Each structure stands twice: as structure tokens, then as C-alpha cells.
Image (spheres, helix red, strand yellow):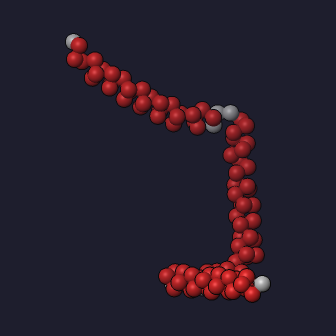
């Protein structure tokens, strides 16, 4: 009798955890019953469409300044990163030389 307490405790924990998961899954279904949620859901496609248009406009505006990352269909990322490291080192060296001159 005394030795079965850990087993019953474990079974209670597992059952409670499963119940909490089911309760969390039930929450969205209950929210759908409210009319305010339905109105928000009906507005979502228009909001998504506007966000997509804004994102495309932003990419069109910023994209050309990214150079090869934007314009190339296939990009060798290893070469790109190596070139960027080389340019950043050159820029740092140039900055340190100009500080010495000042």
C-alpha cells in the first residue's frame, strides 16, 4: 500500500499535464465564438496584403544598395564573406592610418 504512493503521484502529474495541454488547445476554439474575434480574422487578409506590399516597397528601395546580394541570382556566400572581410579589414586599416595622421 505505502509503496504505491510514488506511482499514484506520477500518474497524477501526467494526467494534470495532459489536461493543461488540452485546455490550452481549447482556448482558440472558445475565442472564435466571440464576434470581435471573427471581425479581426476577417480583417487579417487585408492587413497581410498591405504588409506584403510595404515589404516589397522596402526591398525595392533598399535592395540596390546591397549590391551582389540583391542583384545576383546565385551567390557564392563563401566568396562574398571573404570579400566583405577583406574590405572591412582594409577600411579598418585605412581608419587607423588616418587617425595616426591627425
Choose between 80 and 39: the one closer to the eye. Answer: 80
Q: Is residue 23 left or right of residue 39?
A: left
Q: Residue furthest right?
A: 102
Image quarter hosting the N terminus: top left
Residue 91 in sight from this viewpoint: no
Q: Residue at x 73, y 42 (%)?
A: 39
Horizontal and vertical percent position of residue 25: 51, 36
Horizontal and vertical percent position of residue 32: 63, 37
Image quarter hosting the C terminus: bottom right
Q: Residue at x 41, y 31 (%)?
A: 18
Residue 98 picture quarter: bottom right
Horizontal and vertical percent position of residue 67: 66, 84
Residue 54 picture quarter: bottom right
Choose between 75 and 54: the one closer to the eye. Answer: 75
Residue 15 picture quarter: top left
Q: Residue at x 74, y 56 (%)?
A: 46
Q: Is residue 37 left or right of residue 81?
A: right
Q: Is residue 81 left or right of residue 62?
A: left
Horizontal and vertical percent position of residue 52: 70, 64
Choose between 45 and 3: the one closer to the eye. Answer: 3
Q: Is residue 43 above or below residue 53?
A: above
Q: Residue at x 49, y 82 (%)?
A: 78
Amino acid at each position: 500500500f505505502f509503496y504505491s504512493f510514488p506511482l499514484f503521484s506520477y500518474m497524477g502529474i501526467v494526467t494534470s499535464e495532459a489536461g493543461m495541454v488540452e485546455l490550452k488547445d481549447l482556448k482558440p476554439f472558445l475565442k472564435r465564438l466571440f464576434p470581435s474575434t471573427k471581425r479581426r480574422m476577417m480583417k487579417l487578409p487585408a492587413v497581410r496584403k498591405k504588409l506584403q506590399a510595404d515589404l516589397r516597397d522596402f526591398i525595392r528601395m533598399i535592395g540596390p544598395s546591397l549590391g551582389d546580394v540583391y542583384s545576383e541570382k546565385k551567390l557564392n556566400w563563401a566568396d562574398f564573406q571573404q570579400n566583405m572581410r577583406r574590405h572591412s579589414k582594409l577600411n579598418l586599416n585605412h581608419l587607423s592610418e588616418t587617425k595616426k595622421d591627425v
